[in-house]
Amino acid sequence: MAGLYIGSTAGYSGKNMIVMGLGARLQKEGASLAYMKPVGAMPVYYGDAMVDEDARFVQEVLGLEQNQNMVTPVLVTQDFKVKAFTGSYEDLTPRIADAYEKISRGKDLTLVAGSGSMHSGKYCGVDGISVIKRLGVKAIIIDRYAKDIRYDELIVHKEELGDQLLGVILNDVPENMAEEVNTLIKPLLERHGVKVLGVIPSDPLMGAIKVSDLAERLGGKVISAHSKADRVVQSFLIGTMQVENFMTHFRKNKHSAVIVGGDRSDVQLVALEGDCPCLVLTGNLYPNDIILTRSEVLETPIVVIRDDTFGVAKKMEAILSRHKLRDVIKIQQGEQLVSSTLDVPWIKAALGL
């Protein structure tokens, strides 16, 4: 049996996308899989049992039914944190190793998902590096582009893991950075023994969110065109400028939600007539009747938020960069991105599949 740990340099880097995309590809090619997430940082109740939310979701997508206690042997609850912080906890790695051994029986490959960064959980000995070494599995580390590639960190992880590190995946690379990543960063990493298994380009759909989910996450509510609250938001534009300047920017970003004060009916009307996916009105100010009527006619939802415009913009940026992979269309797109960009034949050969 083989094991493959999927970790990352930071949270929200695409671990679930890689696990599901790679897992689906291997299943289509005939491999039998097991899946586990040794440390669950998102405990929720599923029926009478407490499980990790992401782990349960990945199992459903891959069509796996496994014992939840083995899938996630360590759940980070508040009680767990108190014991860990005070030093009142046992060595947890034997529990993880026992679960891995049982869940892997009879399977071609066990996909092991990390939580947070490679060093998350160091305070209680269940960080990615420690788990990989204890289980004796191979590893792939994802680095999601965030102003730069964390090349130093990836090289350090290679030194920590040696031959157990199969390689790295560079995710969410903007189009304007693709040449630098492929001609400078990738060769640099490979000179240090870090194999680059794939460079995944930025895809607006992967960070998109439904209007209804966006309203919930922002603590607001949809007040019009409710039937279209499943429209997708991929980016946003702040409408605080004069309407003439706003029109110039809006023409270049027509698929962006527009964040604007509830009293700026001039900007609101331009955004509605330009078919923006939704209006986000700030300051807890409701629009006038003309705007509400046009919203219903054009089927463009309006969301009203209590916070000020720049506070909402800051929250929006965080939401769009960290929104969970949940919609079917995003899962399918993720699988396509993984399958088309990763060197899957090399990975299979390295794992003996």
Image (cartoon, helix red, strand yellow):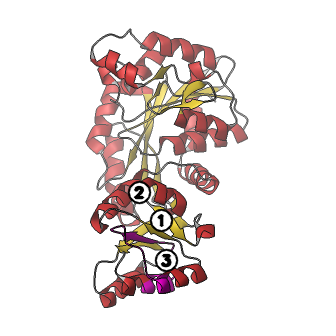
| Residue drawn at x 46%, y 10% as measured from the top left | 94
Q: Is residue 26 visible?
A: no
Residue type, numbered disc 3: Cys
| Residue drawn at x 39%, y 27% as measured from the top left | 128
Pointer 3 or 1: first along the chain = 1
x and y percent of residue 349 in the render? 59, 33
Q: Which residue is mark 1?
A: 234
Q: Which residue is mark 3?
A: 276
Q: Is residue 26 above or below residue 85?
A: below
Q: Which residue is mark 2?
A: 218
**Between 114 and 148, which is closer to the camera in this rendering?**
114
Q: Quadrant of the C terminus?
A: top right
Q: Secondary structure at mark 2?
A: helix
Q: Is residue 83 above or below residue 301?
A: above
Crowd tier of the residue under label 2, counting other residues whose Cα lies within 10 Å: few below 14, some 14–19, many 20 or above: some
Foreground tag (2 vs 1): 2
Q: Quadrant of residue 82?
A: top left
Pointer 2 or 1: first along the chain = 2
